[in-house]
Image: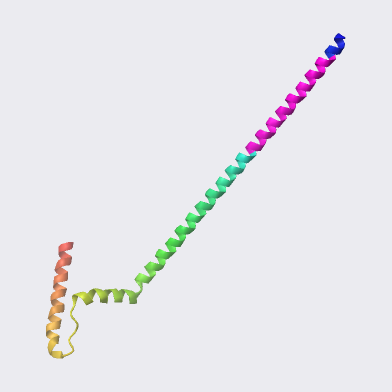
Amino acid sequence: MQEKQREMQLKDLEVKRQHELAMQAKQLEMQEKQREMQEKDLELKRMEAASTEQLKRQDLEVKRLEITEQNKREKQEVIQLKRYADALRGVLHPQPAYPCGLPLYFQSINHESLSSRATSRLNC
């Protein structure tokens, strides 16, 4: 009788032990899955950061190319001549159609030239 009780207790202990082992195995499995999910999240964040960095580089490259193209356009001789002509259009009077007005026209150009030189000296 004591032997049967002892066997029953041993069986109960064995069942409890197996149950505990099964629970520990499940906990380990869940921890492993959780760690895998965290690693995947980390990898996704790294990939996202890398793609964001690549997009920023591409945007900077596009802006650099746009600025380079704009500088090339601004340095073209025709565009510079137009810019200078526009600037002079507001300062100089139109050239007269009759030769009798030419002396007065050249005097005004000379006066503007001298005044611009004086202004540039004062600004230095």
Which sits in the foreground, 52 or 95?
Answer: 52
Where's the N terminus, which quadrant?
top right
Is residue 77 placed above or below 71 in the rendered structure? Answer: below
In this view, the residue in front, 117 or 97, is 97
How does the figure colour the protein chain or chains?
Answer: rainbow
Above or below, comparing residue 64 to residue 20 in the picture? below
Q: How many marks?
A: 0
- Magenta stretch bounds: 7-35
* Residue 38 higher or lower than 47, as above or below: above
Q: Is residue 21 left or right of residue 106?
A: right
Q: Is residue 28 magenta?
A: yes
Where on the picture, by quarter, is residue 21?
A: top right
Location of the C terminus by quadrant is: bottom left
Residue 108 figure quarter: bottom left
Residue 15: say if magenta: yes
**x then y, percent, for residue 96:** 17, 86
Q: Main secondary structure of the magenta part?
A: helix
Q: Is residue 14 above or below residue 26?
A: above
Q: Residue at x 29, y 73 (%)?
A: 83
Could you tell me residue 7's position as x and y percent? 84, 15
Name the side, left or right, on which 100 lies relative to 49: left
Q: To which quarter of the image does residue 104 belong?
A: bottom left
Q: What residue is rendered at 67% in x and 35% in y?
A: 32
Q: In the image, 104: left or right of 67?
A: left
Q: Which residue is more in the foreground, 47 or 119?
A: 47
Find residue 92 and report its horizontal and vertical position in percent. 18, 77
Q: Position of residue 105 (x, y in %)?
A: 14, 82
